[in-house]
Image (cartoon, helix red, strand yellow):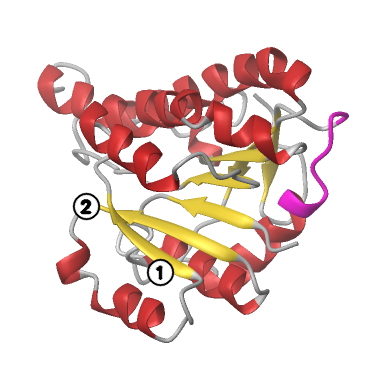
Amino acid sequence: MTKTVVITGANRGIGLEFVRQYLADGCKVVAGCRDPERATTLTGLANESDGRLQVIKLDVTDSASIAGLVDSLDGQSVDLLINNAGVYGPKGAGIGALATEAWLDVFATNSIAPVQLTGALLPNLKASGGARVVGISSRMGSIADNTSGGAYVYRSSKAALNAAFASAAIDLREHGVCIGILHPGWVETDMGGANALIDTSTSVTGMRRVIANLDMAKTGGFFSYDGSVIPW
């Protein structure tokens, strides 16, 4: 049976590579992004996919947009939800120079939206009979691993995502839904920059391996793309 994968932030970088790789595996992919008209690479993949790639206009911070995604799925089961959409926010701001509104905007995308989207798609996930939900986090969300300070906004948003998804793993266990919290590595993307250590193919190949191995014994775990466990 063809698996259905929903991916947010699918127009570039890690999200786009997830689309490529799951399409290559024969999956049906529903790809969400804020501006499909400008996502030419993504829409090009859709045109060549024989109907297996559906591109949806999706703003993960907007409840009406999430409702539109749910309506477009029309009750079909979802086997894998990848909450990939994320932002870094303002860089370099220290204590005394942090703008509250900008901080809240980052939390809306990185911390709140993945939980809200998972909840909205819960009936579709339950219908799968063994679905997996992934939150793309960051090692920078680890409190134990923080030895350099700074990056208040991004670090705190990912730590909040980790805490929320750890709770979701407990609550969704009874529905057979596994939760994975993943660090993609330092990746060559618009966010990661040109000095990053790995490319998107390496990152996504590794994360897909971790996702494939998720089970109830590992649900709620915080893993790097290479499968290693990251401390909270």
Query: Which residue is pictured at 32% across the width and 64% down the height?
Result: 11
User: Which residue, given by chain and number where applicable, does mark 2 sit on?
Assistant: 34
Report how many numbered discs are placed on residues in the image: 2
Up the image or down, 12 lies above or below 81; here it is below
Circle 1 — which element?
Answer: loop
Q: Is residue 81 left or right of residue 41?
A: right
Q: Residue at x 77, y 16 (%)?
A: 174
The residue at 21%/24% (across/down) is 103
Query: Which SS class for mark 2?
Result: loop
> Which residue reaches farthest front?
74
193 and 77: which is toward the camera: 77
Q: Amino acid at mark 2?
A: Arg
- Which mark is on residue 132? none
- Amino acid carrying label 1: it is Asn
Of the two numbered discs 2 and 1 in the rendering, the one whose residue sits closer to the viewer = 2
Q: Is the residue marked by circle 2 packed among few (<14), some (14-19), or many (20+) residues within 10 Å?
A: some
The residue where tag 1 is placed is 195
Q: Of label 2 and label 1, which has the lower sequence position?
A: 2
Q: Is residue 199 visible?
A: no
212 within the magenta span = yes
Residue visible at 28% across and 26% down in the picture: 108
Residue 183, position as x, y percentages in the image: 58, 46
Above or below 221: residue 208 = below
Highlighted range, magenta: 211-217
